[in-house]
Amino acid sequence: MKTSINFKAVKSDSETHNFRKKTFDYIRKDLTPNNEYWLEQKISIRMQKIEAYCKAKSGRKLQKNAMPIREAVVVIKENTTMLELQNLAKRLEDELKIRVFQIAIHKDEGHTDKDTKEWKPNYHAHLVADWQDLETGKTLKHQSYHYSKMQDLTAECLNMERGISGSRGRLEAIEFKIQKKEEDLKVLEEMYNKMKSEMSLDKSQQLIVKENDFLGFKRLNTDKTIANYEKTFRIYRSTIQKSKTDLESKSKQIAELSTKVDSLNKEVQSFKNKYSVLLTEPNVFASEKKKYLDSVTNILERKVKFERYKYPNIDRTENQKLISEMGQIAENICKENNIPFSAINEIFKNNEMAVQLFSILRFGTNDANYMTEDIPIGKQKRRKRL
């Protein structure tokens, strides 16, 4: 299943819609309990903070046409979790400085198939994000490859297929549009030429009206003939002018689309160069590997905290039980997120990170000083203050 993410300026009724603060005709109320919500801050409060920070940082008010808060609709699966979306939010912040502060998972929207009468759900999530650059106080400035990166991160974090590469997909779509425009242009040109040819002598002859006089001879009816010509000229003049305008518009659109194709071709080549570097440069590969492991670590840490707070009264004083519970958590994460277990092993090779995770699970804190006895990690032991 393919996913996508598309940020636009947030709407005034976003919270009303996202958090179902009122009923809507296009939702199934019986499915609304399946929705999930996470809110760090209200949009109005965040907007006030953004405006104040911009004034303090840059000395100027936020521009009227700025879009410091934006909202994205993300295509998800039926079993996509809030944890996965929160991990996506963290990756967006870490790599693109986009700070998501509201998430709503909707499973109550869709439509009924007219033929089969079957319910076709539209599973999606809304991400509301702070688009302010904390270094300047102004809104973030992203290039086209950043938007492509958003699609990559979304597919990776949600374990879904990323459609055709953003540039490649848009390139093919635009090339298709050019083809359609050229076909339309050809039809218009044929119509235009046909209308001009209809003003030839043969067609003109049909406009001439001759009637029998009282002696039975064919005589030209001047009034009716002139009226026919005037009417025909008015129609043709209007139609030809419209066709000419359409021709000019189509030609302009083709030129604009051709320019976009050239730009996207360059962008595609840029991505090819980037991936070539990734495959041939060890330092670049190591950097990408670290980003992936950091992402898995983030998911694992959130899950450990969730289990700790969900079951706070479990006896975790025995090391073996603690290790077993941690192993089960890791196994579930791998299954739910399609993560290879080798990535978990890599994380636990980091002694400091391993102790921190076990400390969170046992005590609900990542302060290793709370550890009162040795906990075996892998084949080694970490000694902490008694």
Image: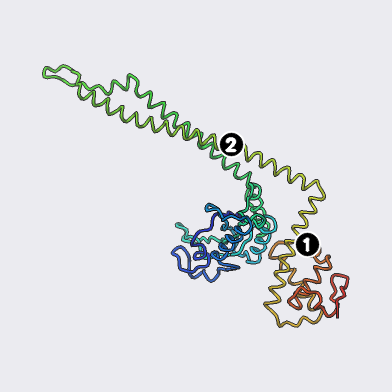
Q: At which x and y percent is residue 276?
A: 76, 44
Compute the Cα span from label 2 to label 1. Answer: 44 Å
Q: Is residue 383 above or below residue 54?
A: below
Q: Quadrant of residue 311?
A: bottom right
Residue type at mark 1 is Ala
Q: At which x and y percent is residue 150?
A: 64, 53
Q: Quadrant of residue 267?
A: top right
- Could you tell me which secondary element the residue under label 1 belongs to? helix
Q: Is residue 11 above or below residue 301?
A: above
What residue sits 55% from the left and 39% below the top? 176
Q: How many marks?
A: 2
Q: Is residue 81 left or right of residue 340?
A: left
- Does the rendering let one see residue 238? yes
Q: Nearer the viewer, residue 283 or 123?
A: 283
Q: At which x and y percent is residue 85?
A: 64, 63
What residue sits 53% from the left and 61% below the top? 121
Q: At which x and y percent is residue 291?
A: 75, 57
- Could you tell me which secondary element the residue under label 2 belongs to? helix
Q: Nearer the viewer, residue 180 or 265?
A: 265
- Sort mark 2 into few (<14), some (14-19) or many (20+) by Cα contacts within 10 Å: few
- Sort mark 1 into few (<14), some (14-19) or many (20+) by Cα contacts within 10 Å: some
Q: Is residue 193 left or right of residue 317?
A: left
Quarter containing the C terminus: bottom right
Q: Is residue 128 left or right of residue 30?
A: right
Identify the coloring.
rainbow
The mark closer to the camera, 2 or 1, is: 2
Q: Is residue 258 left or right of residue 372?
A: left
Disc on res. 259: 2
